[in-house]
Amino acid sequence: MQQYPNHVLIVEDEEEVARITGSILEKIGFSPLDVGSVEELRATIKDGNFDLKTAIIDMTLPDGDGLEAAEIIRSRYPDTPILFISGYTEASWREAFDKFPASGFIQKPYRQSELAEKLRTLLK
């Protein structure tokens, strides 16, 4: 079983967005681990032992959605704060987010300072 200390799990199918988000996370002191689909998330969660600080989840994935991904993460790590991301506005997803306490939202594209502030708020 692999060990993943102090990780932020990025669930994002757009490779460039995942890469940029991972780079931002490294600059602010986190160790990013990215997966590109719900299927890959299931396998990663099953095979890994995470010191999971938070998860950043895109709302639209090729084989599911961000809510399904959040349910998978919370089933194994129930207290994990989740930051949802989307190109759509927060209002588009607000009702769905009510199912996930300890969660936040940031609209893509976002700047490093915006992501850092959202994570600070979420992890308080």
Image: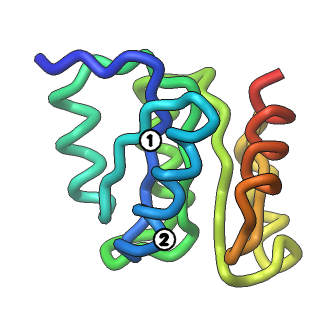
Q: Residue at left 31%, top 21%?
A: 4
**Contact? badges 1 and 2 (CB < 8 Å):** no
Where residue 9 sits: x, y (%)? 44, 41
How many badges with numbers are in the image?
2
Count neighbours of disc 2 (C-alpha within 10 A) and say few if under 14, some if 14 to 19, many if 20 or more: some
Say which residue appears at 73% left-offset and 52% top-offset.
115
Give me the C-alpha separation between circle 1 and circle 2.
Answer: 13 Å
Q: Residue at x 24, y 16 (%)?
A: 3
Of helix, strand and loop, which one carries label 1? Answer: strand
76 sits to left or right of 57 = left
| Quadrant housing residue 46 | top left
Q: For the N terminus, which image quadrant?
A: top left
Q: Amino acid at mark 2?
A: Val
Residue 17: give its label. 2
Nearer-N-terminus badge (1/2): 1
Q: Is residue 63 left or right of residue 10?
A: left
Q: Position of residue 99 (x, y in %)?
A: 73, 48
Image coordinates for residue 70, horizontal then vertical, percent? 52, 47
Residue 9 marker: 1
Name, please, the residue furthest toward the front: 27
